[in-house]
Image (tube, helix red, strand yellow):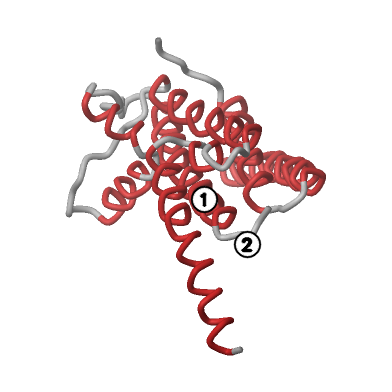
Amino acid sequence: MANANTEALDSSSGALSGLAVFAPVIGWLIPGAGHLIQKKWLRGALLMISVLSMFILGIMMEGKVYSMNFGDVLDVLGFIGDLGSGILYFAARTLHWGRGAINIATADYGTKFIIVAGLLNVISAVDAYHIAIGKKS
Amino acid sequence: MILHPSHFTAAMIFSFFASLVFGITQKNTQREMVRYGVYCFAMFLLGTFVAGWAMALLRHWATS
C-alpha cells in the first residue's frame, strides 16, 4: 500500500515536473506566458499588459535600465529587479533603451517603473508555478 | 516618444498596474481577485494622499 502511494506520488510529481519547471521559466521570459500556456487566458493577458505597460512607460519616462555590475548595492539590486522582466530587459539592453536622464525628476519614476515591472513579473512567474503544481486553481 | 507625467499621475499608473498584478497573483477565486485588487488600489491611493499631506505639512512646519 505504502509502495503504491509512493509510486503514484512519484508518477504524478514526474508528470507535473515538466510544466512546473517550464511555466515559471517561460513566465519569466515572456510576461504572462506562464499563465497563457496553462490556458489562463484572461489572467495571462492582464499580467502581460501590466508588466509590458509598466516597462514601456518606464522607458518612455527616460528611466534607467541597469547593466550587470558589482559596484554599489543599490545598482546591483536595480539590475536584479530589471532582470525580472525577462526578454524585455534583454531587448532594452540590445536596443540601448533606458540610458536614464538624471536631470529629469520623472526619469527617476521611470527607473522605478522598470524595476517594479521586473519584480511584478517574478511574482507572476511564481504564481504560474503554483498553478502548475496544483496549489492554486 | 517621451513621457513626463506629474507625481500624482505616475503614482496612480503605478498603483493601478501593481494592484492588478497583486489581485491576480495573491488570491484564488475571481471575486477575491477583484476585491483584493480594488483594496490594494484604495490603499495605494490612501497612502499617496497621506504621504503627500505629511510631506506638505513637514515642509510648511520646516519653513515657518
Question: Disc 1 to disc 2, how far (Cα)?
Answer: 15 Å
Spot occupied by residue A4 in the image (x, y as percentages of width and height): 56, 82
* Residue in front for this viewpoint, A34 or A68: A34
Question: As shown in the figure, which amino acid type bears the numbered disc 1?
Answer: Ile
* Residue in front for this viewpoint, B43 or A2: A2
Q: Residues within 10 Å of mark 2 (few under 14, many from 20)?
A: few
Question: As shown in the figure, which amino acid type bears the numbered disc 2?
Answer: Lys
Query: Given this view, does label 1 or label 2 mark the residue nearer the observer?
Result: 2
What residue sits 32% from the left and 32% below the top?
A: A64
Above/below status of A54 relative to A134: above
The residue sitting at the left extreme is A70
* Residue in front for this viewpoint, A47 or A102: A47
Name the quadrant of the N terminus of chain B: top left
The residue sitting at the bottom extreme is A2
- For the residue labelled by badge 2, is the local secondary structure a helix, a strand or a loop? loop
Please give the chain letter of the residue carrying mark 2: A
Q: Which mark is residue A123?
A: 1
Q: Are marks 1 and 2 in contact (CB under 8 Å)?
A: no
Name the quadrant of the C terminus of chain B: top right
Above/below status of B64 relative to A13: above
Spot occupied by residue A74 in the image (x, y as percentages of width and height): 31, 52
Residue denoted by label 2? A135
Above/below status of A21 relative to B15: below
- Left/right placement of residue A38 relative to residue A29 reads right
